[in-house]
Image: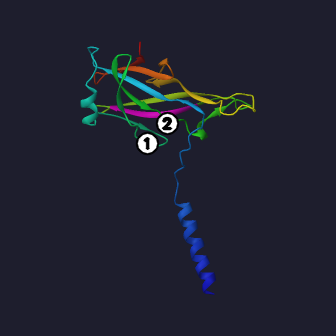
């Protein structure tokens, strides 16, 4: 009898633990080649680069990804002779991917919330997935950033060597996002 009580208690506890999680787990789309690095040039209203060291040190710039709930690690890097902010965008969750019939092409999106000095910029990063239709070839699928949406506009980021770049003109009121020239 005590074995039945113990088993019943264990089953109830296990059921309770499993049913408590209402959140679905983030599961990124997998690919053998991932091109998800995003460089951001932040300039003030006069077109001058903002002080990235101060922004990062004071917590005045951040990027949070909606699905993964991950705060992106932002670094200052040199790109084409200029300092820029750089971070990796999480890949789209598999449950939000849309594929063609043979799953060789697909699209997905990642919603980000960029915060600059208390101003929230909701961005959507659109990805394109491509896989070879030749099933004998292994490791020939890729995920690439295709475009970024902000304030009803679609921006095609500048791409060079699989690194994507945008410029954000920020003045606290009117924020403009465009390709980095």
Asked if disc 1 and disc 2 are in contact, CB closer than 8 Å, the reply is yes
Q: Say which quadrant the C terminus sits in.
A: top left
Q: Secondary structure at mark 1?
A: loop
The residue under the point 64% across, 33% down is: 98
Viewer-nearest residue: 166 or 124: 166
Q: Is residue 164 left or right of residue 31?
A: left
Return the residue at label 1.
70
Q: Mark 1: few, some, or many residues within 10 Å (few <14, many ≥20)?
A: few
Instruction: State whether residue 164 is above or below residue 27.
Output: above
Return the residue at label 2.
90
Viewer-nearest residue: 133 or 97: 133
Q: Is residue 82 left or right of residue 143?
A: left
Q: Earlier in the sequence, mark 1 or mark 2?
A: 1
Q: Say which quadrant the N terminus sits in.
A: bottom right
| Spatial CA span between label 1 and label 2 | 8 Å
Q: Is residue 162 visible?
A: yes
Q: Quadrant of residue 56?
A: top left
In the rendered image, residue 147, in percent from the top left (x then y), is placed at 51, 22
Q: Is residue 174 visible?
A: no
Question: What main secondary structure does the magenta stretch of the protein show?
Answer: strand
**Magenta highlight on residue 112:** yes
Q: Is residue 159 left or right of residue 60?
A: right
Q: Mark 2: few, some, or many residues within 10 Å (few <14, many ≥20)?
A: many
The residue under the point 60% across, 72% down is: 11
The span shown in magenta is 108-115
Q: Quadrant of residue 113?
A: top left
Q: How many marks?
A: 2
In the rendered image, residue 156, in percent from the top left (x then y), is placed at 49, 18
In the rendered image, residue 112, in percent from the top left (x then y), is placed at 44, 34
């Amino acid at each position: 009898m005590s074995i039945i009580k113990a088993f019943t208690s264990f089953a109830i506890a296990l059921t309770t633990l499993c049913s408590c999680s209402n959140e679905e787990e983030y599961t990124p789309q997998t690919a053998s080649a991932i091109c998800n690095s995003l460089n951001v040039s932040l300039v003030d209203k006069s077109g001058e680069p903002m002080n990235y060291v101060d922004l990062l040190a004071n917590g005045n710039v951040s990027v949070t990804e909606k699905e993964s709930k991950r705060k992106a690690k932002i670094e200052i890097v040199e790109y084409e002779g200029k300092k820029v902010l750089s971070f990796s965008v999480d890949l789209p969750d598999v449950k939000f991917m849309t594929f063609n019939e043979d799953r060789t092409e697909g699209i997905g999106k990642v919603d980000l919330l960029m915060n600059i000095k208390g101003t929230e910029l909701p961005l959507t990063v659109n990805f394109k997935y491509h896989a070879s239709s030749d099933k004998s070839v292994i490791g020939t699928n890729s995920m690439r950033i295709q475009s970024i949406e902000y304030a009803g506009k679609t921006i095609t980021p500048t791409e060079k060597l699989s690194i994507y770049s945008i410029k954000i003109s920020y003045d606290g009121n009117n924020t403009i996002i465009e390709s980095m020239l």
